Amino acid sequence: MERSQVRKYFKEFPKWAILFILIGVIILYTQISGEAAAQGVVAGLLFMAVGILAIVLNVKGKPTDEQFDAFVEKDLESVKKEALSKLGIDESEVIAEPDVIWGGLSSRSDCFVGLKKGKDKKFRQTPQPFLILNYTQNQVVTYRCDLDLDTGKYLSPATEEYFYKDIVSVKTKTEEIEAVVKEPRKFIFFGGKKKKVKVNEEYFCLNNSGGDSLSINVASGKITEELGEDTILPSKETAEKALNNIRRMLREKKA
């Protein structure tokens, strides 16, 4: 998969094209079963051709879920290297595998934004927020950014350091917020209206004794409200894994 195919992956299937094909079939059927009219046949064929062409252009060259995931994983390796560079540490200083927490929902509006539930029901997006936790002998050093998969740029990069001895809590917390979501389309042109709802947002949080804190959204009710309750959020799994690892690290360092 090439970076130029990112937008193609998120492009919605043109449901209107099915309607065009049906209209074309109906026109042809009425002309054939009734008195033949050249103009009617041409119109029916034109509707069908437009609908079929739209579907072909949408499907042709569109990456699969697996290809998209492989593309993101490759980009993620670059983000990990960027994290070490920005933090000014060498791989030899890292004492454990880094934890990578995937952000639950990007709220940016300064770049191309794509949201999609794949055939495997897994949520995918661009830009993709990442929080990387690297463990050194005395600190957790963090790097976060929104990875713009469309351009490969690291947006809003930020680094922070937390000494193990100063960390007082690491947890997930849930907050209820009011959000504007789109209703799922019921049939081609119908549905998709916006509405206000109350949803739960879940965050991964790390706090130290000085009052500093680090948090990243890992689960958004807005996603499941728009894409369905069965939507799988990979960010939740990565957050739980990071929680277990950092708690184990803290027990070892504070023992």
Image: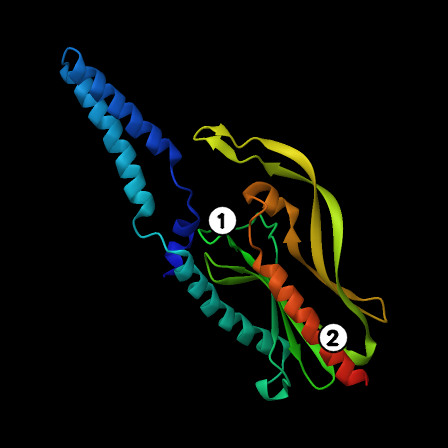
Q: Which residue of the protein is positioned furthest toward the top in this rendering?
A: 35
* Count of marks, rendered view: 2
Counting from the top left corner in percent of width and height, residue 157 is at: 61, 65
Answer above or below: position of 253 versus 22. Answer: below
Q: Mark 2 and 1 residues: CB-CB less than 8 Å, in contact?
A: no
Q: Which residue of the protein is positioned furthest toward the bottom in this rendering?
A: 92
Answer above or below: position of 174 versus 49. Answer: below
Front-most of residues 174 and 81: 174
Residue 51 falls in image quadrant: top left
Q: Amino acid at mark 2?
A: Arg
Q: Residue at x 16, y 17 (%)?
A: 32
Counting from the top left corner in percent of width and height, residue 86 is at: 61, 75
Counting from the top left corner in percent of width and height, residue 191 is at: 52, 29
Tell me the mark number nearer the camera, choosing from 2 and 1: 2
Task: Name the residue tied to disc 1.
Answer: 116
Residue 48 falls in image quadrant: top left
Image check: 32 left or right of 211? Answer: left
Screen quadrant of the N terminus: bottom left
Residue 163 falls in image quadrant: bottom right
Front-most of residues 223 and 232: 232
* Residue 62 visible from this viewpoint: yes
Screen quadrant of the C terminus: bottom right
Q: Residue at x 46, y 58 (%)?
A: 151
Label 1 packing within 10 angstroms: few (<14), some (14-19), many (20+): some
Label 2 packing within 10 angstroms: few (<14), some (14-19), many (20+): some
Q: Amino acid at mark 1?
A: Lys
Quick one: SS at disc 2? helix
What mark, if any, has residue 247 been given in the picture?
2
Q: Residue at x 53, y 36 (%)?
A: 184
